[in-house]
Each structure stands twice: as structure tokens, then as C-alpha cells.
Amino acid sequence: MENPKIAISDLNLFIGKQHILKNINAEIPSKKITVILGPSGCGKTTLLKSLNRLTDLNTDVKVSGSIMIDNEDILTTKRDITDIRKKMGLLAQRPYPLPMNIYNNIAYGLRISGRKNKRFLDKRVEHYLRQVNLWEEVKDRLRDPAAALSIGQQQRLCLARGLAVDPDIILADEPTSALDPISSQTIEEKFIELKNNYTIILVTHILRQARRIADHVIFMYLGEIIEQGPAAQIFENPQEEKTKSYFQGMFY
Amino acid sequence: MNIKKIEERFFRVLMFCSTVIIATTLMLIIFSILYKGLPSVSWEMLTSTPKGGFYFGKGGGVLNAIIGSLYLSLGATFLAFLFGLPLALYMNVHLIKHQKLVNGIRFVLDLLWGVPSIVYGAFGFTIMIFFGIRASLLAGIITVTLFIIPIMVRGMDEVLKSVPRGLLESSLSLGSTQAETSYRVYLKQCIPGVITAILLSFGRAIGDAASILFTTGYTDYIPTSLNQPTATLPLAIFFQLSSPIVEVQNRAYASAVILVTIILIISILARVFSSKFHKNKINF
């Protein structure tokens, strides 16, 4: 692959004595949607979270190997971890809005990086809320608590909040699993739109979702990468037995 | 009647009886305090210090104890908050990956919570002797602070503990440091619980007699500095109730009414404040 955004090599991750990620070698293309696919408990969420080192928060975690993002190994870099995390927006399995009003949810990330000008913040908040099609729904109640929004709206707010800190990568961990079909569709459409400017990594176990939006696929099983490649190749012509039987619905 | 129905009825009666017994006991306590104390609560009682000595004098009121108690418990609550909030946040944000250590701290705090307050009083007294401090407001504040810190920290810890991991991850992935996450996200999410913990500790501080028995002393005067001994409401009850003089005993009952009223006001304030700050809380 030419100029991958992220290159993972020989990544091994243990939590306690459990070997969660085994010899992960993968390349993730820039400005495309990469889908990490696989049954529950295969380590796909852990792989995603090791990309912005949220795995650091686990007790007794050991990581080896390297994760190069823009030619910088984030596992050994001397740079501040918050700088690395800022490059990546995270969308979790269910929305976790911050305990503050709608406006401040977006402005929070800007404020902690020192942008405090009121007019600038107003503009940015509107911009990012428009970007996730939320502006029209909330423009008259920006000072209402984020908790008052529906789950689907909250997830879009979380996306907007992530975009507001100006990342180049979006990490999404089954972002539609708690959402209704309409909200899920909005999120998917947004991803397709956003891939022009962002590298998107999406973890999912919904095969149809992967088929709809993936450009590149990584298939994982029991902590290992079984197969990876361009979406068309993997879906049309999988090479490995495990991938084939997964696609046929033999296991989830 | 089948066995299930009997069981159901048995437990219903049991629960009903327990509720009635507890409610009646509480009512009796409040009633007897009010019955004996209300007639003695007068403007003079609230606004003047005892005349002719708190043990023998028949005139005056318990202003010294009211002011003293407020000074003492406000001071102790403030100090405990100053140390308690950072500890509780540190345990739940910074030490998130050291669960064993955090559980160790919790265990120690629970042990300290269980230590009778007279032991804190004795401990405070030894420290006073060591440093050569007399029984004073300062010594009392320090002792009571030590006594309520475990209560306050565990109270805050219980609410902070319930913040889901996802919120921490969200905040960190926006580029916040752990300190920003603590004070801007965790604290905001938990404000109602934090306020409750503070007021609970304040209630314990103002109501405890044993920890201040040796450490603050007792006096007829309102303290004008931290180095002076101080009267407090619980000790006002303790000392004056044992007096043979009826007027003095009445001051004890009045003190009880005042103490209960203060605690009642605090509880109501706690409710009001926590619901006011509840609106931004996310229900997970």
C-alpha cells in the first residue's frame, strides 16, 4: 500500500495473562473507510482503542510492536499523549455526551486547546452541528443539556464534538449499535461524506453495514487478523476458510 | 392457602411492621425533643451567651454553642473538602488502571469510617499534647476534619465510581488531560452526589460530641480566634443536661432543638442544590 495513514507491525497486547491481540500487522489507507470486522470478543475494539492508546487505561496491560501514524510510532513517542489523541475523534458504542449543554459539548474540545474567543466558538459550533445535520434540530436550544437529546441526536453530537478538535482520523466502535435505523443511516451517510477529508476506521459486526460502506476490510478472529484487503476483493473473493464461513453466517 | 401466598403475606407484614417501628421511634425522638425543648427556645436563648456560668447560671442562652458549632463544622467541612475532593477524583480518574490500589484505599477509608469518634478525639488530644496546643477551636477543627474525611471521600467516591468508562474515554480522546477530565467532566457529572457527600459530612461534623470533648473544650464565650476554646451544641447538651438546675437543663433541650433544626435545614438545602445541578447530568 502506498503511504498508509496507519501502519501496525507485530502488535501484541496482553491484559494480565490474556493474549488479546496476536501479531497484528496491518496497514490502513488514508482517506478511506476501513472496516474492522469480526465476531464478538475477537479483539477488534481493543485494536481500535490501542490506536489512540485508550488501552493504557487498563490494569496490567502490556503492549509490544509498533503503531506508526504519519510515520510516528505512537507507542514510543515522547510527544504528549493528549496531542496524539486529539488527532483522532472517537465515536463509541453508545453516545457519551459530556455533562453540559449542547453548545459546550462542541466548544469543550476547542476551549481546552485554548480557543476561547466567543465569536470563533459560535461559528465553529454552528459549522460542526451543520456538518452532522443537527443544527436545524437544535439551533433554538443550544443551552439545553445534551442529555435532553434523543440517542440518535446524541451520537451525532458526539461525532460533531469529535470533529471539532480537528482530527484526521475518526475511530468508530460500533457507532450505530444503540441507534434506530434512521439515525444509523445518517451516521453511515456522514461517514461516506467525511471520508473525503478523514481516515475512518469503523469496528462493526454488522456485515451488511460493512458491505455498504467499506473501502478496505480487516477481518479478525480470536485476536488475530485472518484476512485483509480492499473491500471488493474480500467480499467477492475471500481466500481464507474462516472468512468464507463468517460471511455465510456460520458464526457471529 | 398455598405456601407462596403465606410467604408473601409474611414478608409484607414484616416490612410493614419494620417501617412502623422505625417511623414511630423517629417521631418519638423528635416529639420528645420538641416537647421539652420548644418551650425553652426563645429569642434570648438564640441571641445571648450563658449568664453566670453554663453549669450553674440560670440566665442567658446558647449563642456561644450555636456560633461555636457553626465555626467548627464549617471549618472542618471546608478543610475536609479541600483534601477530600482531590483524593476522590484522583482515585477515580488518575488511578483508574490501578484498581488494586484504589480498592486498598477504599478499604482503609472504610476502616477509618468505622473508627468511633472518641478515638479520633483521643488521637487529636495526643497530637495537641505533642505540639503543645491547648483545647481550642483549631484543635477541634483538625480533629473533626480527620473524622469526616473518610465519610466525605467515600461519599464522593461512590458517585464518581458510577461514571461509565465511556465518558472517561470520550473526554480523553477529545484531548483533555486527566486533570481536565476530573474537574470539567467528572465533577460536573457528579455535582449532586458531591454536594450530598459534603452535606452528609457537615451533618456528622456538627452532630458529633466525642471527637471534640477533649479537643475544643467548653466556654461561655464566643471565640474570637482559632486558639480559644469553643462551646458546641452537642457538648452544650451533654454538659447542661447533667445539671441539677432546671433552667440549665432547659438550655440543653433547646440546644437539641436548634441542632436538629440546623441539620434539617442542611438536608433540605442539599436536596434543593442537588436538583438544581441535576440538569446537566447524563443518565447512563
Image: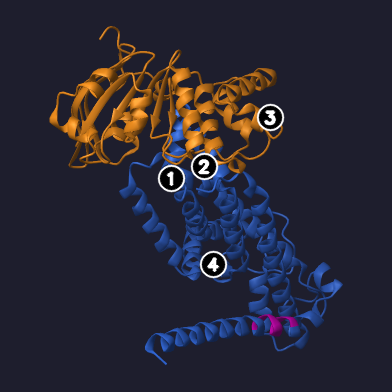
Whether B110 is drawn above or below A133: the answer is below
Query: Which residue does the numbered mark 1 point to in the structure image?
Result: B92
In this picture the colour scheme is by chain
State which quadrant residue A10 falls in. top left
Disc 1 is attached to a residue of which chain? B
Query: Which residue does the numbered mark 2 point to in the structure image?
Result: B186
State which quadrant residue B77 falls in. bottom right
Compute the Cα span from label 3 to label 4: 56 Å
Q: Tags 3 and 4 in contact by the CB under 8 Å rule?
A: no
Q: Check residue B32 for magenta coloring.
A: yes
Res. A139 mark: 3
| Few, some or many residues within 10 Å of mark 3 (<14, 14–19, 20+) | some
Of B115 and A212, which appears nearest the observer?
A212
Compute the Cα span from label 1 to label 3: 35 Å
Q: Position of residue A161 (x, y in %)?
A: 53, 28
- Tell me what residue is drawn at x 20 percent, y 21 percent: A237
Q: What kind of residue is marked 2?
A: Tyr
Res. B211 mark: 4
Q: What kind of residue is marked 1?
A: Asn
Disc 3 is attached to a residue of which chain? A
Q: Tag 4 or tag 1, which sits nearer the N-term?
A: 1
Of marks 3 and 2, the one in the foreground: 3
